[in-house]
Amino acid sequence: MKHIIRLLALFMLAIMLLPTFVACTDQAGDDETTPVLGTSEESSSEEVTTQDNLPELDFGKEEIRFISRNSDWVRGEIAVEEQSGDLINDAIFNRNIAVEERLNIKIKNYEITGDNYAVSNEIRTAVKSGTDDYDIIANSVYSTIMYTSEKIFHNLYDCEYLDLEQGYWSQGFNQAASIGNAQYMCTGSIALTLYRYMFVTFFNKNMFEESNVGNMYEVVENGNWTLDRQYEIASGFYRDINGNGSADLGDRFGFLTTNKAYIDAYWSSCKLPILTKDSENYYVYSIDKDRMIVAVDKILNLWYNCPGSYIVESVSDSADQKAGASALAEGRAAMVTLRLVSVESDELKNMDDKYGIIPIPKLDEYQDRYYTFLHDQFTAFGIVSTVKEDRLQMMGAVLEAMASESYKSVIPVYYDIALKYRYAKDEESGRMLDMIYASIYIDPGVLYTKVLSSVHQQLREIIRSKNNAVVSTFKTLDKVVEKQVKTLNDSLAAMQGG
């Protein structure tokens, strides 16, 4: 068992160091582009250790005050009150006990109920009033990082115990969130939402076998899982089950999805960058409209021209997840787009048929690889700027210890036991999950979307309009966003004395 856990830890380290393409463009001759971070030879060798480099520390039972969200899918991500017998709950409980005993601290988590901005607004108010109520914020990245220029965070590079180059921190996020010579938020194994919020394709294996579709895992591994291939497969599944002569939720479909957040997944899966980086680690607006036009044509064709596709009007994140999971479990949809967190749902845990998990299809067979989109509500961490200098190093040590311990004790439980063997129903899906996680692409244009005219949400509007309006949409938006990117760069540079 120890050997298995060690191998899993080594594997997780390797995939967390895999590159994203956030820092590169496809433009030839662009010498100003910073190269992406990749996996070094050392990161995949037997000499790699998952242990952090923290010295022996004793903080005299200091209380560390987290502030986080009290909402579905993230509740209990930071702390739980007691052991319950649930594998994930107990792993988080034990992680915190281990960190508390190691550093001689007490973890206190304040869960805030409210909208997506409740936590960040609480911190903004505290900073403006100068009150010292919280130490570490753990919140959805898109509704928090946008306020960085308000000086609500410490620069994480000032924390001597925080080693963001370690494998339990997301190197893709570091590449996206670092700016100039600073970084204000971080994430990685410390956040289960980094795994739960991956967008994937679930398919009903029984329906596929009955229709003689073939081995989907081979299709994926051969690089043939494309939007056109999904159209082809979905086309053969439609049946007017209720006999009313019109396509509705009472029928059987080859592909079902909802028309809001799930559209975002195509930014990554079709390799459509929004922002990249220049040689000084600042953002560059990099929309490729020609590639977007091709992608939108294929998405529109799949969604609205395919006889086996059904697009459900979005209601809410939780309702959309339930609609897709129910359709899959009840045999009303052969394929659905969902966040990975659905593996924990009653619909899929109680599903009689077997299901499989594969990536969102890529644009075409010429695309170099599959890319995975993370819902922009995944959790990132920052140290509140009201934390006094004499406590700052303690906060860095706490984050480092929690991330390291999560990597060793929480992620193996969630990823290996809960996903591969408890919920996922087949070992091949476990192998696919390895590849899907290794293919996460984090674009800073998504992180900062709210100060960039919600640029990444424009794809939603284009697809929902059923019209390829890429050119007209970005004709005026390009200049606006370019100015906003400059403002963002300037404001973040000013914080560093630039």
Image: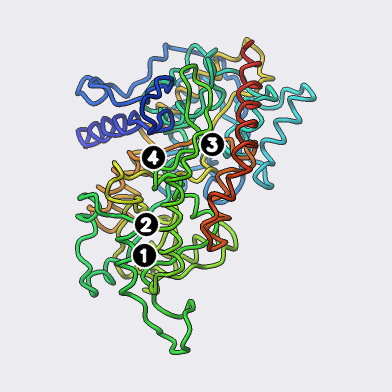
Q: Which mark sits nearer the N-terminus, 3 or 1?
A: 1
What x and y, as percent, mark residue 15? 31, 33
Q: Residue at 41% across / 38% down in the picture?
A: 441
In this rendered view, identify the residue nearer to me: 383 or 215.
Answer: 215
Q: Which mark sits nearer the N-terminus, 2 or 4?
A: 2
What x and y, as percent, mark residue 273? 46, 38
Q: Residue at 23% across / 53% down in the picture?
A: 428
The residue singled out by tag 2 in the image is 201
What's the residue type where badge 1 is placed?
Met
Task: Name the secondary structure under disc 4.
Answer: loop
Q: Picture quarter containing residue 316?
A: bottom right
Q: Picture quarter containing residue 486?
A: top right
Judge whether residue 338 can be spotted in this image: yes
Position of 401 relative to 157 (above/below): below
Q: Is residue 77 left or right of residue 6?
A: right
Q: Residue at 63% across / 24% down in the picture?
A: 135
Position of 141 relative to 347 (above/below): above
Asked if the residues shown at circle 2 and circle 1 are in contact, with their CB atoms under 8 angstroms apart, the answer is yes
Q: Residue at 33% across / 72% down in the picture?
A: 235
Position of 361 relative to 78 (above/below): below
Q: Which mark sits nearer the N-terminus, 3 or 2?
A: 2
The residue singled out by tag 4 in the image is 440
The residue singled out by tag 3 in the image is 445
Q: Picture quarter containing residue 314?
A: bottom right
Q: Which mark sits nearer the N-terminus, 2 or 1?
A: 2
For label 4, the crowd category at 10 Å Cα-Cα, with few meaning under 14, some 14 to 19 and many 20 or more, is many
Residues at marks 3 and 2, CA–CA distance in whole angstroms: 24 Å
Residues at marks 2 and 1, CA–CA distance in whole angstroms: 7 Å
